[in-house]
Amino acid sequence: MELKKNPKADVGKNSTLYFVIGLAAVLGLVYGAMEWKKYDKSNDYDISMNIEDQLDEEVPMTEQIKTPPPPPPPAAPEVIEVVEDEEEVEETVIESTETSQEEEVMEVEDVEVEEVDEDISVPFAVIEDVPVFPGCEGASNKKQCFQDMMQKHIRKNFRYPEIAQEMGVQGRVNVIFVIQKDGSIGNIRMRGPDKNLEKEALRIINKLPKMTPGKQRGRAVKVPFSIPITFKLQ
């Protein structure tokens, strides 16, 4: 017995149409989901300012202090009394100091003016007769001989302080001293980078011999002299 198909019972008859409709529906749902927007619920607030309430401020009452007017000036007296001076004042008489020709003038004896021994100091560079260092009496240029003998004296008596060597201290000590009118050395001043170097420079200058004093216009004067002493580590 042969089975016969009913054309109405064919399931795949409109499958293509159903597929297209289902696909369109799915695409519509996906698009709607992507375009879906949600807004926060807004609350309606009254943002207007009540200006009238702010302007209605109570201003405190201030007490007004009235300053009293200044007192009137005192009235002038109606009658002015004139008081006469009863006491007499003696006048001072100034006598003239001019002498007349008739008056005799006393003779004044001659007054002797004592010479004042001024303490004059003349720099070494401008003095007429420079101090003479022992050994330079016969030198033609005593100024140059003086300077050479000073350098020789420093080299002979120079001794580097041990504590300054250990500390690595070096530098220049500027020394100023005065050759007095009797040829002695005095008023020694110095300035250097270290106290130990200054003490050594003082010791060297104190060993200077007595010299022939310098002279200005034939008179012995004080002569200041300056010289640098350099301390340098080898």
Image (cartoon, rainbow, N blue to C red):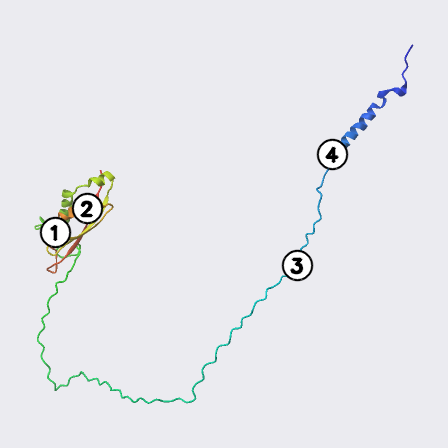
Alpha-carbon distance for marks 3 and 2?
A: 91 Å
Mark 3 Cα-neighbour bin, 10 Å: few <14, some 14–19, many ≥20: few
- Location of mark 4 (residue): 33
Disc 1 residue crowd, few under 14, some 14–19, many 20+, Cα 10 Å: some
Q: In front of the other: label 3 or label 1?
A: 3
Q: Earlier in the sequence, mark 3 or mark 2?
A: 3
**Alpha carbon separation for disc pair 4 and 3:** 51 Å
In the rendered image, the vertical position of residue 171 relative to residue 220, given as above or below? above
Which residue appears at 82% of the width and 24% of the height? 16
Seen from the viewer's position, the closer of residues 147 and 179 is 179
Residue 220 image position (x, y, % from top left): 11, 58
Kind of residue at disc 1: Lys
Q: Label 2: which residue? A: 199
Q: Which residue is mark 3?
A: 53
Q: Is residue 176 left or right of residue 35?
A: left
> Marks 1 and 3: in contact by CB < 8 Å?
no
N-terminal of the pair, mark 3 or mark 1, is 3
